[in-house]
Image: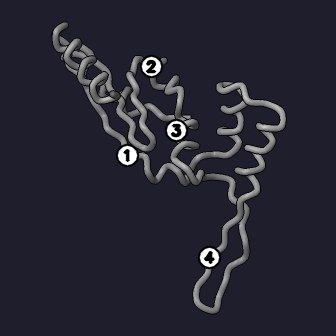
Amino acid sequence: MALVNAVSDILEAADMSTATLFGLLDLSAAFAIVDHSIIVQLWRTLFVVDGMVLRWFALFLTERTQALAFPGVMSVYTLLHFGVLRPLLFLLYTADGAIAQKHGISVHLYVDNTQLYTSCCAADKDSAFLLLCKIHFP
């Protein structure tokens, strides 16, 4: 459905004689850099989760540790401050796309695949390209 929506937007822009810049992002490695404090804040504000559920969710994220093991040797356990284990948590982390949208960039998100695009007249393509390259998610 996201692809159909994007193609529809691109065709509509072409009907208005504008060019569309389209960026496809594979964020599969981004699962490892999700900041736990930001995702807990998003649950509190964006999804209005509070009380026991929020405490359980925060504990689930913040009490994770990891260690490396090789035959006969094991490192110390280290507390993890970043990363999620499930695509759903990453999707919730990037769910609103508000940062891109406030800059006039259309966003379609599906798990770890993200489509960013904007339409402009041909003369403005360079500034639109720079804008598309500068968008950062939470």
Residue type at numbered disc 2: His
Residue topped by disc 1: 26
Residue type at numbered disc 3: Leu
Residue plotted at (65% across, 39% down)? 39
Residue topped by disc 3: 91
| Mark 4 or 2, nearer chain start | 4
Q: Is residue 128 left or right of residue 96?
A: left
* Rendering quarter of residue 75: bottom right
> Closest to the observer: 109 or 22?
109
Secondary structure under tag 2 reads loop
* Rendering quarter of residue 51: top right
Residue 126 seen in this snapshot: no
Dots 3, 4 in contact, CB < 8 A: no
Secondary structure under tag 1 reads strand
Q: How would you rate the neighbour count of disc 4 (Cα within 10 Å): few for under 14, some for 14-19, many for 20 or more?
A: few
Residue topped by disc 2: 103
Secondary structure under tag 4 reads loop
Residue plotted at (63% across, 52% down)? 82
**Quadrant of the drawing holding the N terminus:** top left
Dots 3, 1 in contact, CB < 8 A: no
Residue topped by disc 4: 68
- Furthest-right residue in view? 51
3 or 4: mark nearer the eye: 3
Residue plotted at (17% across, 14% down)? 14
Residue type at numbered disc 4: Leu
Marks 1 and 4, how far apart at CA: 27 Å
Marks 3 and 2, how far apart at CA: 21 Å
Task: Name above or below for residue 78 compared with residue 113.
Answer: below
Dots 1, 4 in contact, CB < 8 A: no
3 or 2: mark nearer the eye: 3
